[in-house]
Amino acid sequence: MGVVTPFPGKPPAQVAFDRAELMHILDLYGRMVAAGHWRDYAMQFGRDIASFACFRRSAERPEYRIEKRPALRQRQGQWALVGESGVVLKRGHELGPLLAPIERKLLKLVED
């Protein structure tokens, strides 16, 4: 397929995840579902922020929110991991290290 180039001079109407970012997030989501931690998710795309929320049950607040804010790219980093209470748990420039605290929940000790 060809490469889509944005029209010069006009910012995008909304922020979204690109394919690689979404695949990384959905890979983690699938492993957490298989482990029994999460059951539902929601995505929100706005003018300033794209958000992926993970739920233990769909009737509750999200356990984690993964937010992408391109306006903060040059400062603290465009990625933020937000906890259930709304507190920013981790902020960074790359998605992989940001998701490390969640991936630690999947580690299990195996006996010989």
Image (spheres, helix red, strand yellow):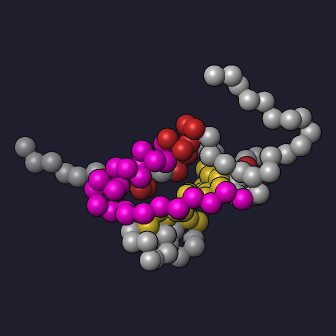
Residue 3 versus residue 110: which sits nearer the camera?
A: 3
| 8 lies above or below 57 | above
Q: Position of residue 57 (x, y in %)?
A: 39, 72
- Magenta segment includes 42: yes
Residue 61 is left or right of residue 109, and the answer is right
| 35 lies above or below 64 | above
Provide the residue span drawn in magenta.
24-46
- Residue 104 seen: no
Residue 22 is left or right of residue 59, and the answer is right
Which residue occupies 71% across, 25% down?
3
Which residue occupies 47% across, 61% down?
41
- Residue 20 seen: yes
Q: Position of residue 4 (x, y in %)?
A: 74, 29
- Magenta segment includes 37: yes
Q: Position of residue 17 (x, y in %)?
A: 62, 46
Residue 87 is left or right of residue 56, and the answer is right
Given the current orientation, which residue lies at the most extreme right position? Answer: 9
Rendered-image quadrant of the N terminus: top right
Rendered-image quadrant of the C terminus: top left
Residue 80 versus residue 41: which sits nearer the camera?
A: 41
Given the current orientation, which residue lies at the most extreme left position? Answer: 112
Given the current orientation, which residue lies at the most extreme top position? Answer: 2
Q: Position of residue 98 (x, y in %)?
A: 52, 50
Which residue occupies 28% across, 56% down?
35
Residue 60 versus residue 81: which sits nearer the camera?
A: 60
